[in-house]
Image: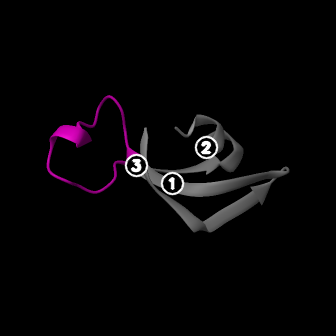
Amino acid sequence: MTVTKVHAGVTREDGGHVWVWVTGHDHPTCSWSSVEPHAPCIELMVRLDVLRRHAR
């Protein structure tokens, strides 16, 4: 998944973890980098610590 937006205003705490809502494009099914801009393919709630660990 390529994250296009982290919705910082949409968070949740659960079991000592903070979750955030992210939107983005699915790999390898979405060819987002080679087509006209379009709406995100995926919307997920992800743990903030996991998102930080995988951010480049």
Q: Marks 1 and 3: in contact by CB < 8 Å? A: yes
Compared to 33, does 5 lie above or below? below
Q: Secondary structure at mark 3?
A: strand
Chief secondary structure of the magenta portion:
loop
Q: Amino acid at mark 2?
A: Leu
The residue tagged 2 is 51
Q: Residue furthest right?
A: 16
Comparing 36 with 43, the one in front is 36
Whether residue 37 appears in magenta in the rendering, the answer is: yes
Give coordinates of residue 49: x percent, y percent: 70, 44
Residues rendered magenta in the picture:
24-42
Give coordinates of residue 15: x percent, y percent: 84, 50
The residue tagged 1 is 22
Residue shown at the point (23%, 55%) measured from the top left? 38
Q: Secondary structure at mark 2?
A: helix
Whether residue 10 appears in magenta in the rendering, the answer is: no
